[in-house]
């Protein structure tokens, strides 16, 4: 579902201004898109991502560099495994696809692996689209190795590169995601499978956009193929993962991203996120858009350490976790909560305040009892 | 998160120091725990890079795999790990005391008491973080199906002799760690965050350095400052001052220091293999040894701070008095250890890859029961935990204002005294709900009879129903007296076992039917470039 294009040019112009003169837009990758779902309410993240600001560079310029990085060991291992899975003209991979997802189809005798090389990302995208059209018409097993797909994000296209896309003989398309975490005795780390599913869902959306341009539009399967090493070996094992839910969530987040326009509208003129600006100016610019910091951001957003420092300085209770906030009603800062708990502020008829005072009293009693009796058990 | 815990965290933010989240220690700590600080290679399925292991805080044993992709070097590491861990485990297996155990008599089907051996103490494994527990499980899984040359002379790449045995023990420990309240295998971050509320989120508490910084900040620093330093501060080389507690390493360490060192090691090894005469080989051997020493130094450099932090954390925990029920739970751990020792001695095969339906149901039921037991016991041992339950309406304390003697109807009237308690708490009592209090360590049951609001709280009338002896008059001390301070809980103190499960051979078809005769589990298939 592509977002409305109205005012696209004006918005693009405005976003370029926010990015700063001569700063190229950082293309959103599938990981970043999928991470949007982690904290959809954050306006700061929405505008920075929407404008294509390099958040890592921005965070470093703000004095809170991100801590993400990939070990070259993991990188090498990932590449080696992917090469192994795709070896032999994709025969093994297509065998896995047929066996897991499409056992009724004819066995892939001579899989077709079209050459997708083309100058520039845009060229590769056009080439991918052409190859998909041809493969769908041909009605034979086809493996697209690292195709280039485009997804309309807030009016500007994000380019995405899935590990592989397979066209079935019946013309349907399947996203293949190759990961190097192991499947041990038939089960894998749920957090990692979840991340892979969210990432694959973004590819499914992008493929659906491509499919919509064909006549008749081919079906993009909502069960993707996840290929991982089996147990402690290098042998690949495949499982079908249903990504309908992740697809729906991401689609909704992407549709909401059009809010970028509204957020941009609320910013004062002259706000710019170029990493070349002095830190003070940048801090003020970033402050102009409210953030919704939660500790979960630390593992997903490059700007998290900056936002955390600001949240802590402001005494925001969400810095301690979203669950803390849930019980505190309208009280949102550490000082407010503690003052209310001590009875110095707050309306005693407010149930949140009353509960807080009771909790504070019980806690003080228990600690005093423990001090007095050297931690005797309850009478 | 309960409000009381949230208040603890907020207080920690304000004071700059962690606040107590428990007033007693809720887990057993051995006098001589085995600390294991493992590291893995990024991207590999549990390919170890190195470890510090030992029971002496001043003399850890450093184990290193100079090239984690080399199967022989990994086996050498695992063999060394077995040398470090198995003698420690064995030292506890020999010392036993006589105990009783209830078993089902195979002929009569009745529960009978039988004499049994119980190990007097059990070995305790401490790892820095939750990831360490997962790695212990993973290592156990990777080793227990390995075949040694003795077991199977035909096996390709035979494992060193004691490696499969270590795999079985690590599997047992990893499995036991999933039982709530067990202490055979503990992660220090879990232990510390159970006992202290820091001024950061639970997510950030997973960082051992930051967690310790809040609990025991260095002089002149607040917890927040010290935690930030532990998380982010790097030296001129770009290396973290406080390396991650593992098992994953910092990517900057991998890319800048470790990868070049491993490359030098590989080069030295290739050069040695290509040496043409003895003299040349000697020189190249020295180069190889130097390259290996370099990797060892690197691994020690990133594990030693964690090692020291683990011991410091244990010191902090030891300063807390042990909870009253901790000993009882540790006895269960000793039974668990003894049981596995017996299975190993009896020559039983390693734990299967997947449990059959009945075993899995047993395990889940046991974990649920232990969770309920832990919740009840922690509340009874610790007024701060009890305060949380009182806040939640699951317990109440107060003063006895009136005791009226009453008797049950029937041929032999028994005492059923009515006790009125004035409380400020707000328990969620249903009609005729049962409540419990601890009477000399045993739970006494009472029934909720009536309720009357009064200033600052309520008067709750209870009828005591048991633990008063067999006579017409209640035994002295078994009924609360006027003026006494009492604490009743709505939850039971002791957990009953659930419904009995069928024997495995009678597994119903809904659950896959009888599992059949357990055959020996095949070893994992190996391919040439396998890792681990």
Image: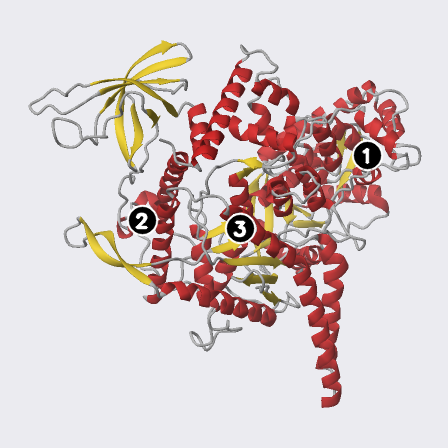
Left or right of residue B495, residue A346 in this image: right
Specify few, some or many for label 2: CA neighbours under 10 Å numbering under 14, 14-19, or 20 or more. Answer: some
Question: Residue drawn 34% across and 21% down?
Answer: B399
Specify few, some or many for label 3: CA neighbours under 10 Å numbering under 14, 14-19, or 20 or more. Answer: some
Indicate the position of residue B126 as horizontal and vertical percent values: 51, 54
Which residue has dot 1 on it? A52
Asked whether residue B201 appears in the rendered view, the answer is yes
Q: Find residue B311 and name its label.
A: none
Q: Chain of mark 3?
A: B
Q: In the figure, residue B94 lies in which quadrant?
A: bottom left
Left or right of residue B194, residue A27 in this image: right
Secondary element at tag 1: loop
Closer to the chain start, of discs 3 and 2, is 3
Q: Nearer the viewer, residue B367 or B58?
A: B58
Q: Find residue B314 and name its label.
A: 3
Q: Residue furthest right?
A: A21
Q: Residue furthest front?
A: A372
Instruction: Using the numbered discs, state the Cα–Cα distance from disc 3 to disc 1 in whole angstroms.
Output: 47 Å
Which residue has dot 2 on it? B513
Asked whether residue B349 appears in the rendered view, the answer is no
Q: Are marks 3 and 2 in contact (CB under 8 Å)?
A: no
């Amino acid at each position: 579902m592509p977002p409305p294009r109205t005012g696209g040019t004006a918005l693009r112009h405005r976003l370029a201004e926010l990015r700063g003169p001569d700063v190229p837009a950082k293309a959103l990758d599938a990981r970043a898109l999928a991470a949007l779902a982690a904290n959809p309410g954050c306006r700061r993240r929405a505008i920075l991502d929407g404008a294509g600001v390099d958040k890592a560079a921005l965070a470093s310029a703000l004095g809170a560099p991100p801590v993400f990085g990939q070990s070259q060991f993991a990188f090498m291992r990932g590449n080696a495994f992917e090469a192994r899975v795709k070896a032999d003209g994709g025969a093994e991979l297509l065998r896995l696809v047929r066996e897991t997802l499409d056992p009724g189809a004819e066995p892939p005798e001579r899989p077709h692996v079209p050459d997708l090389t083309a100058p520039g990302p845009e060229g590769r995208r056009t080439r991918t689209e052409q190859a998909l059209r041809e493969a769908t018409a041909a009605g034979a097993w086809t493996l697209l190795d690292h195709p280039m797909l485009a997804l309309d994000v807030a009016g500007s296209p994000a380019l995405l590169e899935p590990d592989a896309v397979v066209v079935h003989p019946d013309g349907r398309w399947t996203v293949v995601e190759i990961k190097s975490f192991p499947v041990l005795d038939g089960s894998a780390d749920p957090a990692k499978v979840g991340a892979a599913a969210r990432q694959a869902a973004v590819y499914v959306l992008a493929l659906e956009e491509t499919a919509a341009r064909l006549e008749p539009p081919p079906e993009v399967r909502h069960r993707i193929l996840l290929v991982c090493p089996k147990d402690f070996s290098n042998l690949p094992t495949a499982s079908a993962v249903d990504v309908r839910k992740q697809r729906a969530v991401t689609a909704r987040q992407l549709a909401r991203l059009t809010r970028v326009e509204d957020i941009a509208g609320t910013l004062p003129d002259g706000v710019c996120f170029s990493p070349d600006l002095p830190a003070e100016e940048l801090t003020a610019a970033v402050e102009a858009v409210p953030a919704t910091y939660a500790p979960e951001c630390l593992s997903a957003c490059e700007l998290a350490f900056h936002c955390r420092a600001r949240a802590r300085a402001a005494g925001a209770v969400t810095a301690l976790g979203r669950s803390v906030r849930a019980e505190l009603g309208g009280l949102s800062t550490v000082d407010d909560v503690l003052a209310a708990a001590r009875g110095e502020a707050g309306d005693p008829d407010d149930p949140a305040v009353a509960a807080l005072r009771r909790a504070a009293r019980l806690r003080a009693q228990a600690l005093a009892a423990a001090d007095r009796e050297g931690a005797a058990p309850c009478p | 998160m309960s409000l009381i815990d949230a208040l603890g965290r907020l207080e920690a933010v304000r004071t700059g120091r962690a606040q107590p989240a428990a007033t007693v220690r809720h887990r057993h700590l051995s006098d001589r725990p085995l600390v294991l600080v493992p590291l893995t290679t990024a991207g590999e399925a549990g390919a170890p890079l190195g470890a510090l292991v030992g029971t002496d805080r001043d003399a850890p044993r450093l184990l290193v795999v100079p090239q984690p992709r080399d199967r022989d070097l990994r086996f050498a590491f695992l063999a060394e790990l077995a040398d470090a861990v198995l003698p420690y485990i064995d030292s506890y297996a020999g010392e036993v005391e006589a105990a009783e155990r209830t078993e089902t008599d195979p002929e009569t089907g009745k529960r009978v008491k039988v004499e049994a051996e119980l190990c007097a103490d059990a070995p305790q494994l401490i790892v820095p973080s939750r990831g360490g527990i997962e790695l212990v499980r993973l290592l156990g899984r990777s080793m227990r199906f390995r075949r040694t040359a003795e077991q199977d002379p035909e096996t390709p790449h035979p494992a060193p002799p004691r490696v499969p045995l270590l795999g079985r023990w690590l599997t047992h420990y990893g499995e036991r760690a999933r039982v709530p309240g067990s202490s055979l295998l503990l992660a220090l971050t879990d232990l510390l965050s159970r006992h202290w509320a820091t001024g950061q989120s639970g997510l950030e508490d997973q960082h051992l350095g930051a967690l310790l910084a809040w609990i025991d900040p260095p002089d002149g620093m607040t917890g927040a400052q010290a935690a930030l330093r532990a998380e982010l501060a790097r030296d001129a080389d770009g290396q973290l001052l406080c390396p991650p507690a593992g098992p994953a390493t910092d990517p900057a360490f991998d890319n800048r220091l470790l990868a070049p060192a491993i490359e030098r090691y590989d080069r030295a090894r290739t050069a040695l293999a290509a040496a043409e005469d003895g003299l040349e080989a000697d020189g190249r051997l020295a180069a190889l040894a130097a390259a290996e020493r370099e990797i060892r130094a690197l691994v020690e450099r990133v594990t030693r701070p964690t090692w020291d932090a683990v011991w410091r954390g244990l010191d902090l925990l030891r300063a807390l008095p042990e909870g009253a029920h901790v000993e009882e739970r540790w006895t269960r751990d000793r039974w668990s250890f003894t049981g596995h020792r017996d299975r190993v001695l009896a020559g039983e095969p390693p734990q299967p890859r997947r449990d059959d339906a009945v075993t899995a149901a047993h395990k889940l039921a046991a974990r649920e029961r232990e969770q309920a037991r832990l919740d009840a016991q922690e509340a009874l041992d610790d007024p701060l935990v009890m305060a949380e339950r009182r806040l939640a309406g699951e317990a109440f304390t107060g003063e006895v204002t009136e005791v009226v003697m009453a008797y049950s109807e029937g041929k032999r009237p028994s005492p059923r005294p009515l006790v009125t308690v004035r409380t400020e708490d707000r328990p969620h009592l249903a009609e005729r709900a049962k409540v419990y209090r601890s009477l000399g360590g045993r739970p006494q049951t009472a029934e909720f009879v009536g309720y009357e609001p009064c200033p600052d709280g309520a008067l709750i009338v209870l009828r005591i129903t048991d633990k008063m002896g067999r006579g017409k008059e209640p035994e002295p001390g078994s009924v609360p007296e006027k003026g006494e301070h009492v604490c009743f809980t709505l939850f039971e103190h002791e957990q009953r076992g659930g419904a009995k499960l069928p024997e495995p051979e009678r597994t119903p078809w809904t659950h896959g039917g009888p599992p059949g005769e357990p055959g020996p589990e095949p070893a994992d298939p190996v391919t040439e470039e396998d890792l681990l």
